Amino acid sequence: MDRRSLLVSGALLAAATAAGAAAVTAPATFSIDGHVVLQAYQALVEEHLTGVLRAIRALAATSDAGTASWTSIRPALDRLSQDLTTDATVWFAMPDGGYSTTAAGPVGETLADRDYFPRLMAGRDVAGALVISKSTAHRSIIVATPVVKAGVVIAAIGVSLRADLVSQLVGERINLPDDMTFYALDSKGQTAIHHDPERMFQYPSEVGDASLKSAVATMLSQPRGTVEYTFAGASRTALFNESDVTGWRFVLVRIHK
């Protein structure tokens, strides 16, 4: 597939040069390399996540965040929540894991048991962790940053983006033909986003045949490449590329019918 051209709509060329721009419908088609399509799709998702990260980093540096007070920081977080295009839960967490959300205020739950939480408390950003939200039960993608004062982490600001709406964003901006699909796998092989919302958060290696299991293993062991496998009765060719932003493998698939 690396050497074969793929027919894609004119909207893909617009997406490749301006990932955040609105999709454009064009009657003509262009024959372009599949890597261009993969890069456009990956850039769209990465820019969305990094845009959220930039916004919460800016908020984490404010005096309101530095108070470690939910009451002080809530107005700014409410504004952020309203501005996000993919409906999300915005939250403010304490070092013990207790947290509050813009939707519900203090929730009486803890984030201390989340795999990403120790990273936050160590002063590092999080981008792309997958969770089932405790407050909404949505399949969510975590973007979060610590609030640091005098070299000590005193709180954290996070956003739980709905994975289905991030997938929908891709579908709306990147008009793939019927014989193509997309998904992304996290470092554990779990599906982060998918053209088919029902397949999000599945482990493909557990739902397909041996060829898919082998393809997933290859994708997780290499930063980029091409794999072949069968799924749902059809042979497939997939291009994949590792993300420096999330650690995911972004995957573009052509279905051979």
Image: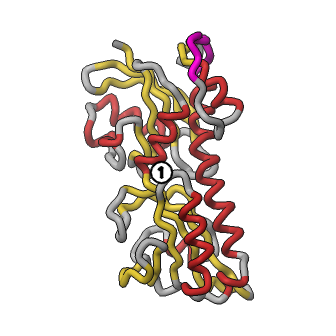
The relative height of residue 54 versus residue 41 in the rendered view (above or below) is: below
Quadrant in which residue 125 is drawn: bottom right
The relative height of residue 252 versus residue 101 in the rendered view (above or below) is: above
Q: Is residue 135 left or right of residue 208?
A: right
Quadrant in which residue 138 is drawn: bottom left
Residue displayed at 39% across by 75% down:
113
Helix, strand or loop at disc 1? Answer: loop
Is residue 33 among what the camera can see?
yes
- In the rendered image, residue 97 lying in the magenta stretch gets the answer no
Q: In the rendering, at what x and y percent does residue 89 appear?
A: 46, 65
Nearer to us in this view, 74 or 249:
74
Residue displayed at 51% across by 26% down:
175
Is residue 189 among what the camera can see?
no
Quadrant in which residue 206 is drawn: top left
Residue displayed at 36% across by 80% down:
109
Q: Is residue 106 left or right of residue 48?
A: left
In the rendered view, how is the structure colored?
secondary structure
Q: Looking at the rendering, in which quadrant would you find the C terminus? A: top left
Q: In the rendering, at what x and y percent does residue 68 appear?
A: 60, 87
The relative height of residue 2 versus residue 110 in the rendered view (above or below) is: above
Residue displayed at 56% across by 86% down:
71
Q: Is residue 224 left or right of residue 255?
A: right
The relative height of residue 94 versus residue 28 in the rendered view (above or below) is: below
In the image, the segment drawn in magenta is 25-34
Nearer to us in this view, 20 or 211:
20
Residue identified by numbered label 1? 187
- In the rendered image, residue 29 lying in the magenta stretch gets the answer yes
Q: Amino acid at mark 1?
A: Ser
Q: Residues within 10 Å of mark 1 (few under 14, many from 20)?
A: some
Q: In the rendering, at what x and y percent does residue 115 appear?
A: 44, 68
